[in-house]
Image (cartoon, grey):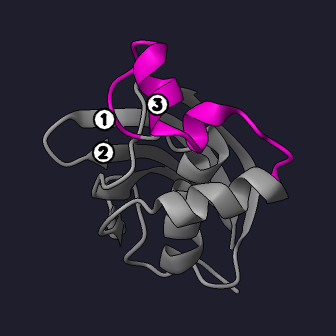
Amino acid sequence: MSVSADIKAGYTLPPFVIETVSPDAMRDWSVFLADPNPIHLDVEVVKAKGLGNKRINQGPINVAYMMNMLMTAFPGCRIETMDSRFLDNVYEGDRVIASGEVTSVEGNRVTCDLKLDVDGRGTVNAGTATILI
């Protein structure tokens, strides 16, 4: 597969939107990730820790939203490298948008800046990825 001529530095990737972060998904992911941290499962624990009044989404789910955006933008691609930094929490009920912009294309390698935004609060995760087309 080759990179389309339309894909060049500055190209904006189509957003990947999660309309509402589900506490049921957090419970399921707690099992998959072997992560029983109660901030993902129990609102009362979140309140007691002074972290708000909603369950907090697991970090790997937030990264997966950005990965899904890449895989949707470039079907069949392989993520070669990816890094990100957590800037804020994502809470149950949040609407999140993963987006990205191509920063370079070298052969079949596409490098992108990525971010995950929460409606009304801004960027909560940001990073870069290099994918192979």
59 versus 78 height, above or below: above
- The earlier-in-sequence mark between 3 and 2 is 3
Point out the frontmost of discs 3 and 1.
Answer: 3
Q: CA distance from mark 2 to mark 1?
A: 4 Å
Q: Amino acid at mark 1?
A: Thr
**What is the span of residues highlighted in magenta in the rendered image?**
33-54
Quarter of the image where the C terminus is located: bottom right
Q: Hey, what amino acid is under mark 3?
A: Glu
Residue displayed at 31% across by 55% down:
93
Q: Secondary structure at mark 2?
A: strand
Q: Secondary structure at mark 1?
A: strand
Q: What residue type is disc 2 on?
A: Asp
Characterize the local packing of mark 3: few (<14), some (14-19) or many (20 or more) Cα atoms within 10 angstroms: some
* Residue 106, quarter of picture: bottom right
Q: Is residue 107 left or right of residue 32?
A: left
Query: Horizontal and vertical percent for residue 111?
Result: 57, 50
- Observer able to see residue 89: yes
> Left or right: where does residue 102 sit relative to residue 93?
right
Q: Nearer the viewer, residue 94 or 2?
A: 94
Residue marked by disc 2: 117
The reply to whether residue 107 is visible in this rendering is no
Check disc 3 and report its element: helix, strand or loop.
helix
Q: From mark 3 to mark 2, how far is it between C-alphas?
A: 26 Å
In primary-sequence order, the first of circles 2 and 1 is 2
- Residue 123, numbered circle: 1
Q: Is residue 38 magenta?
A: yes
Residue 64 screen position, x and y as percent: 61, 57
| Residue underneath mark 3 | 44
Which quadrant of the rendered structure holds the N terminus? Answer: bottom right
- Mark 2 and 1 residues: CB-CB less than 8 Å, in contact? yes
